[in-house]
Image: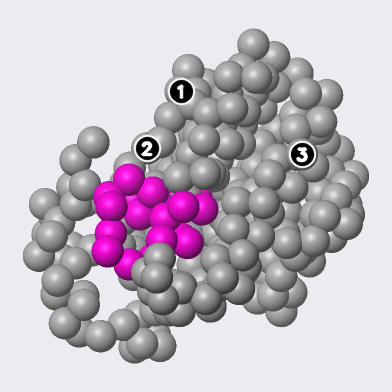
Amino acid sequence: MSDRLAGKRLVVIGAGTGIGAATAERLCAEGARVAVLDINMPAAEAVASRLADEGHDAFAVAVDIADEASVDAAISQAAARLGGLDGAHVNAADLRTIFADSDALALDLAVFDRTLAVNLRGHLLCTRAVLPHLLAAGGGAIVYTSSDAGDIGEPERPSYAASKSGLNALMRHVASRWGKQGVTANCVAPGFVMTPEMTAGGQVPSDWIALCLEQTRSTRLGKAEDIAGVAAMLLSEDGRWINGQVVHVNGGALLN
């Protein structure tokens, strides 16, 4: 593993499990100092403790990205302990609502409102909290976890898709508004990723897994590490001339 992130002060928001946990691990492996933020504090502490035991500089901070005061406090705490910020991976989402995200006629508006409160408004709150620290450092990078759902046009999950399309627009705004001040903003858009939790839990039907594999131009489904690798690149100097982009990482399921 390279040391291209040596000394970088980074936060990963939504790092207790899945893609976020894999990203925190990858960033540490490349030399970064990492604040592990999650609403699930025991999960965040487990990730941070494991990384610290491996000799990395990592620590956990509790955050609820649907709550502005919580976001501001968490980012302030992380920045204070790190001595500033050089970048952030905003990866949080409330996936408890996704199974009730039916179609535009049947959809419970409470599901729509909650999905946007976390997946879009919450990402704006994180952006507002992180940006001043990046600007104070002379620039930095924000990476958002979007989704192929923002572009693919599905017959279900309109709330989720709308939140991810909106997130792509937010990312482009940040890149356009602050790019000249050294800030890059990009989205990594995963296809179907089997996280360790999904694999261990066995909650994904085998016929759905087979369908997703059939629709890819790859020999396998995605892993959390696939997304973490791209996020690490976008947070590194290798990604400094990439700005305002949605980077699809999906095994060729969506050609864009």
Left/right of residue 1 with respect to residue 219 in the rendered view: right
Per the rendered image, the range of residues in magenta is: 145-163
Left/right of residue 232 with respect to residue 87 in the rendered view: left
State yes or no: discs 2 and 1 in contact (Cβ < 8 Å): yes
Residue positioned most to the bottom: 202
Q: Nearer the viewer, residue 35 or 7?
A: 35
Q: Nearer the viewer, mark 3 or mark 2?
A: 3
Q: Nearer the viewer, residue 64 or 154?
A: 154
Residue behind mark 2: 247
Figure disc tally: 3
Left/right of residue 187 with respect to residue 76 in the rendered view: left
Could you tell me which secondary element the residue under label 1 belongs to? loop
Q: Return the disc, 3 or 2, that comes first in the chain's sequence.
A: 3
Q: Amino acid at mark 2?
A: Val
Q: Return the disc, 2 or 1, that comes first in the chain's sequence.
A: 1
Residue 254: x and y, percent?
Answer: 21, 47
| Mark 2 vs mark 1, CA separation in Å | 10 Å
Residue behind mark 1: 242
Classed neighbour count for the residue bearing mark 1: other residues with Cα under 10 Å, few (<14), some (14–19), many (≥20): some
